[in-house]
Image (tube, rainbow, N blue to C red):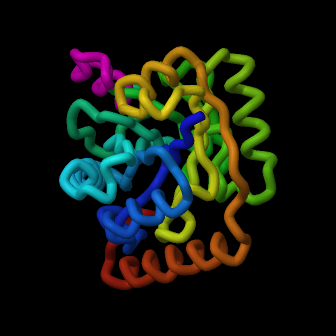
Amino acid sequence: MLRFDLHVHSEYSRDCRSPVEEILRSARRQGLNGIAVCDHDDPEGGRAALELAEKKEEFRDLTVIPGVEISTSEGHLLVLNPPCSIPPGLTPEETIRRIREADVLRRAFIIIPHPYRKSAHGIGRIEGLDVDGVETFNSKNIFGNSNRKAENEAERLDLPKTGGSDAHTPDLVGRCYTTIPLPASENNAEDVLKALREGRSGTGGKTTPVSSVIGQMMKNVIRRLKKAAKGDYREW
């Protein structure tokens, strides 16, 4: 059984300072088989993680899937193997349409993350959107209701389930994860994504400590207040 954390942030996200190398080391310490680095509106963190994993011997047994977390007009979308750059602020439908149009090799995998946690820019709906999977276990959903609702909807719509820590610090990488029933010999991005498309996935792990969630929220508020003081209200 493989374990992948499919929602991790790095220093390429505006609200995160985690070095890519520390993220990969933490993933190995947690016994993960792979991760997806999905920074806010910036695919460079995922690319940097993939390049580092391929270059350094200590990470050779760790599969990295590059990704991005796109800010749509209604909330966030995770895209694994993004085929192109997508500007933030488009509707979810237009964002997905552009991805599908550019994805001639059919390698991209689109996930709705934390769909029912509005405080984290959850879209709030799943049905009617051309997505490949639903994040049914986000470790920052500390009260569980949002995760349960996402899981119920994924089952009703027959969509694959994924899990991700949504980690913004290296120590929280792997807090929760996606399980994929593949042997270690098939631990590569192509086989993992194939299994996900076929719905051969589950979730595991535990929620983030409340103190960590509150700490991250306070940092975000302070960061936004500083930007607002300079006249930048784009994140409000």
Tell me which segment is drawn in magenta.
95-107
The answer to whether residue 234 is left or right of residue 164 is left
Q: Is residue 219 visible?
A: yes
The mark total stands at 0
Query: In the rendered view, would you say 11 is above or below 60?
Result: below
Q: Whole-percent x and y of residue 11?
A: 33, 68
| Rendered image quadrant of residue 227 | bottom left
Q: What is the quadrant of the N terminus in the image?
A: top right
Residue under the point 37% across and 43% down: 63
Above or below, 64 relative to 217: above
Left or right side of 112 for 62:
left
Residue 152 location in percent, x, y? 77, 28
Residue 214 on the magenta segment: no
Q: Name the residue located 23 percent from the left edge and 58 percent from the top edge.
A: 56
Q: Nearer the viewer, residue 229 or 77?
A: 77
Q: Closest to the observer: 185 or 76?
A: 185
Residue found at x 49% / y 82%: 222
Picture residue at 30% right of the left edge, 17% below the top: 106
Q: Nearer the viewer, residue 142 or 77?
A: 142
Q: Position of residue 100 (x, y in %)?
A: 31, 20
8 left or right, relative to 174: left
Q: Main secondary structure of the magenta part?
A: helix
Expressed as whole percent of the image width and height from the top left, the position of residue 8 reads 46, 55
**Can see residue 42?**
no
Task: Report if residue 96 lies within the magenta region.
Answer: yes
Q: Quadrant of the rendered structure where residue 215 is?
A: bottom right
Q: In this orientation, which residue lies closer to the viewer: 168 or 96?
A: 168
